[in-house]
Image: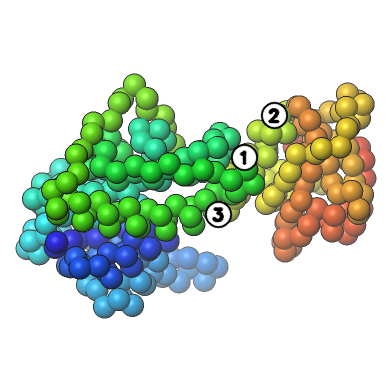
Amino acid sequence: MRLIFMGTPQFAVPTLRRLAASDHQILAVVTNPDRPQGRGRQPASPPVKSIALELGLEVMQPASIKEPEFADQLQALRPDLFAVVAFSILPRRLLRIPPLGSVNLHPSLLPAYRGAAPIIWAVINGETETGITTFRLNPRVDAGDLLLQRRVAIDPDETAGELDARLREQGADMMLETIDRLEAGNIEPLPQDDACVSRAPKLTREDGHIDWNQPAAAIRNRIRGTNPVPGAFTEWNGNPLKIHRARLCETDLDADLDRSEPGCVLVADPRQGLVIATGEGGLELSEVQPAGKKSMEGIAFVRGYQIAPGDRFGAPPA
C-alpha cells in the first residue's frame, strides 16, 4: 500500500520504523517544522524527521498544512492511505486525498480520553487500565470510527513517561496490523459512542502544582501523571521544588496527621525518609529536585537541606 506518514514526537517514531520495515511503501513523511530549543535557541529537528532521514525517506515540513499548495503536493504523490500518529488535526481538503482514508493511532480506549494528553490524564485520574486505538480520521477530534482496540494495564507505580514508552511500541504493531487488514478488506469500522466521551486536554505548568489539601493518593497520581512533563512541583523556602516520585506512607501517623496542616513535614529522617501531611494521609517524597540542582532521593534532601518536622511545603497562606 502507498502510504504518507504524518507524525512529530517520539511517540510516533516506533510506528514509522515499523511501517518502513514492512511491505508497504512510504511515499513521504510529514512532520512539523524545526523549532528553536535550548538556551541557545538553535533550530532542532522533530524526532520523526531525524528517523525519516536516517531511513532515507522524503521529509515534508509545511509551515501550514492548510495551504492549498501543500494539498497539491500530497495529491501528486497518489497515496492510498495516510498513517497518522501524534500530529495536527487534518483539514477536510487533506482528508479527501487518499482513497482509503486516514488512520490515526491514539493511546486510549476511545471514546475515553479524547484529546492531546490521554496518557497523562489516565494516570492522574488513577486509572488501572488504558489502551490503544486505531480509528479513521474525520474532521472532529478523535471522533472517527474505531478500527482496532487493545486494553493495557497501568502498573501501580508507573509514570506517564514509562506508560508512554510501552504504548508507543504496542501501538506501532497495532498500526501495522490495521493497515494490513484494511488492505485485505477484513476489518469492520465501528462508530464511537458519544455518550461515553471523556476529555484529555493539553496541560499547562500549573497542572503540575501540588495542592497538599488533596488526599495523598490523588497527589501521588498527579506526580506520576506529570512525570516527565509538565512536572509536579511545590514550594519550599520560597523556591520551587520538583517532585519526581512519591509513595503512600504505610506508617501509622494518625496522631501526627491530626495535629498537622496539609503541607507540613511529618517525618524528616535520613533513614525513614521525608513524609508530608496531605488532606488525607501522609505522602513520602522519594525523589525530588531543588531549584538549580540535580534530582536526588528524599532522604538525601533531608540530609543535605536540614529538613525538620513542622517545616511547611507549598505556597504560604494568603
Q: Is residue 98 left or right of residue 149?
A: left
Q: Is residue 239 left or right of residue 187?
A: right
The CA distance from mark 3 to mark 2 is 24 Å
Q: Residue placed at 50% from the left, 38% from the top?
A: 129
Q: Earlier in the sequence, mark 1 or mark 3?
A: 3
Residue 257 higher or lower than 249, as above or below: above
Q: Residue placed at 18% from the left, 61% from the top?
A: 3
For the residues bearing labels 3 and 2, Cβ distance under 8 angstroms: no
Instruction: Note whether residue 205 is visible.
Output: no
For the residues bearing labels 2 and 1, Cβ distance under 8 angstroms: yes
Q: Which residue is mark 2?
A: 214
Query: Which image quadrant for residue 15?
Result: bottom left
Q: Residues within 10 Å of mark 3 (few under 14, many from 20)?
A: some
The CA distance from mark 1 to mark 3 is 14 Å
Query: Which image quadrant for residue 147?
Result: top left
Q: Which residue is mark 1?
A: 222
Frontmost of labels 3 and 2 is 3
**Label 2 element class:** loop
The x and y percentages for residue 274 are 84, 46
Q: Which sits in the foreground, 65 or 52?
A: 52
Which quadrant, please, contains the C terminus? top right
